[in-house]
Image (spheres, helix red, strand yellow):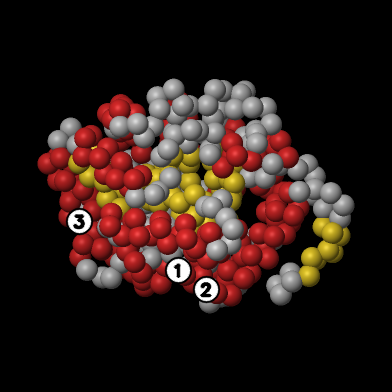
Amino acid sequence: MSVEPAAAQRRELYSPNRLKLGVFGPNLSSGLAKTKVPERWSGSWRDNVALAQMLDDAGMEFILPVGRWKGYGGETDPQAATFETLTWATGMLAATRRITVFGTVHVPLIHPVYAAKMCVTADHVGTGRFGLNVVCGSHQNEFEMFGEPLRPSAVAYEYGGEWLAIVTRLWEGGAPFDFDGMFFHLRGLEALPRPFGETRPLVLNAGNSPAGKTFAMHYADHLFTGFGTLEQAAETTRAIRDGAATFGRTVGIFSAVNVVCRPTTREADDYYRYYADEMADWAAVDAIAGDVRRRQAANYDGRREDRVRQAAGYGGYPCVGDPDRVADELAKISAAGFGGLALGFVNYLDEFPYFRDHVLPRLEARGIRDATAASPSHH
């Protein structure tokens, strides 16, 4: 990585790998899973730092947190203990050398001038490795904690567009400016320092609704979206690329997968069934059901298979099997047009080393990743 990162380097997460890999949600107690198994993820600061350094050393490209303010209830109350993501990201960046770390921001809950400054602070700590994940809506009961309305999807993304325009304009530096929009009327805006190297942080947006996808096509560097089957994956990426082209843009396309990798496929299948079905915290799964139908309709229709998938981790695609099978599945997702995958594990620290030692070499053998591609340290 150069001393002052170029925009293209940021966009590629400082990696030439065709398929970028990271982890999703380690800032949360229980991680992504709604399960009662005792080995579920702690979400502790100590475990987060250990994981970040392990991922960094392995050449993984990113860590993506989930912004949460309440748990899901049930017996285990998953995600009740969570770290605020901009502060968390700053700490993760201080503890690592190569990896990109995102902060996830619910834009109605933090003023854009304040957010712009927080992001720049994190970016300087990480010498250009901070990324911003923009979230325009969330859970009704969370917004009620802040006294904020949960706007209809189309309006929420209009708000998000103004918010992001202010943030990115502040990152550009220059003379003070005014902003007059539908939602914001601000005077004399200015902010220094600029982001590290004077190129802006990456912008990621998770969109599953039509309005969300349009927003990401228009504003984001990468769109994070779900898919149901591998056949749907190719259709999803094709539609996104076509849509972005109408704005004269290209966007990277990321998604989430839940990984269970064991020496044999039978062991992996048995564990997936154990943690995501037999030991699922169904009350927590049911608590999120209405919200999932709204935000991830393509992945959830109330069938048991979809409830299990939600228990396994936010409805992400299940990659379950021995190392060959998991590598094959990841290769197919890559071939379908996804450039990045955020991985979920029941316990990241316990399970990632096996993935690192047995799946990453298989992806390298398939030409999807390069063992020598990790960026050199710049600290």
Q: Nearer the viewer, residue 330 or 26?
A: 330
Q: Nearer the viewer, residue 204 or 293?
A: 204
Q: Which quadrant would residue 94 be assigned to in this image?
A: top right
Indicate which label's residue lies in the foreground, 3 or 2: 2
Q: Position of residue 264 (x, y in %)?
A: 14, 35
User: Who's the residue at 62% across and 65% down the image?
Assistant: 160
Q: Which quadrant would residue 308 be assigned to in this image?
A: bottom left
Label at residue 209 = 1
Q: Are marks 2 and 1 in contact (CB under 8 Å)?
A: yes
What is the three-letter code of the residue carrying label 3?
Asp
Q: Position of residue 192 (x, y in %)?
A: 80, 45
Q: Position of residue 50 (x, y in %)?
A: 45, 31
Q: Is residue 8 above or below residue 188?
A: above
User: Who's the residue at 45% across and 51% down the image?
Assistant: 253
Res 197 seen here: yes
Q: Position of residue 216 (x, y in %)?
A: 54, 60
What residue does disc 3 label?
277
Mark count: 3
Earlier sequence position, callout 2 versus callout 1: 2
Q: Which quadrant would residue 290 be assigned to in this image?
A: bottom left
What is the three-letter code of the residue carrying label 2?
Ser
Q: Are marks 1 and 3 in contact (CB under 8 Å)?
A: no
